[in-house]
Image (spheres, rainbow, N blue to C red):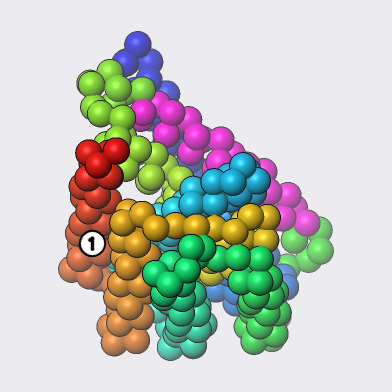
Amino acid sequence: MVLFEAITLLISLAVLSKSSSIVVENLVKLSKFFGISQIAIGFILLAASTTLPELSVSIISSSLGEGAIAAGNVFGSNIANIFLVFGLGGFLYGLTIKRDELKDIAMVLVLTTIISSYIIFNSSVSERALGFLEGIILLMLFLGYILYTFRERRKESSGENSITKKEALHSFLLFCVSIVIVFISAGFVVESAVKIARFFHITESFIGATVIAIGTSLPEISICLEAIRKRHYGIALGDAIGANMINLTLVLGTASVINPISVLLPVFIAALLFAIVANMLLFYAASVNRGLKKTGGFLFLLMYATYIITIFYLQIGELAQT
């Protein structure tokens, strides 16, 4: 049984790696065809695709009156996108951030930090963290973000890198198919990992805080690492940072419009604080160091491990009080 799951895990990881590579290759072609930067194509097309699981979880949980699940999923994913994705990328390959990309990164980090801070403040003074009005505002911010990205990040197409309409259509179809394969293979990876963990009698709470938490961000992790490995840093930045922005605007906004979100749990507040710290550290790395090297990547991974340990400890405390 465990041998079969181990083989399934290895095959799924191989498929995940290959499909992620195809996604990156075709995104590069599409960015050339549309005449926009790699960070812009990552912001819009890739980030929107990889946040579909969070959006579906948000709609379902909010419809059932469990808005806290949607909010927790959003912030858990955002923390992983910065600390885990960029931590692994910096530690394994090194990540370079160009000066012209800093403006886009700074804008998103400031906005997501303001939204996170508002939710903490509103949770402390009100029974709800986000209501219908806040949801509408978040959705408007999402539309503004998309328009800004298209308008500001366009560039002149280079004749040397011209892509025909036929090649662009082929690349888009390959991108769509590869994204689907990424999600399917990531699902098999998580399922196999969970079964192996249970075989060795690892507790359910630990599995949830580690394997499943990482598994929800596995598409972003695999695609971003492949992009960083191939030195297409803009795609990795656009995917991870763009996904965070979409999570906090489109995903949370949709959930808030459907049902008000109320969160008072220490676990959620801790996640919000870690999300703000993640933004601050990434901004520092981008503005001062112009990227992440092995030491910076290790620090980010250490911060993610600290986050996992913290929420695991807080969850045990919550269970002990009930």
| Above or below: residue 217 compared with residue 271 | above
From the image, tell me which residue sits under label 1.
303
Q: Residue visible at 35% across and 30% down?
A: 193
The amino acid marked with disc number 1 is Met
Using the rendered image of the protein, determine whether residue 163 is visible from the camera's viewpoint: yes
Using the rendered image of the protein, determine whether residue 116 is visible from the camera's viewpoint: no
Q: Residues within 10 Å of mark 1 (few under 14, many from 20)?
A: some
Q: Residue visible at 35% across and 38% down?
A: 208
SS at badge 1 = helix
Q: Residue visible at 70% across and 85% down?
A: 151
| Above or below: residue 24 compared with residue 124 | above
Residue 255 placement (x, y as % from top left): 62, 56
Residue at the far top: name it: 1
In-front residue for pair 133/92? 133
From which residue to which does the magenta span run?
A: 169-194
State yes or no: residue 14 in magenta: no
On-image quarter of the C terminus: top left
Q: Is residue 276 left or right of residue 12?
A: left
In-front residue for pair 294/166? 294
Residue 280 placement (x, y as % from top left): 33, 78
Residue 10 placement (x, y as % from top left): 38, 30
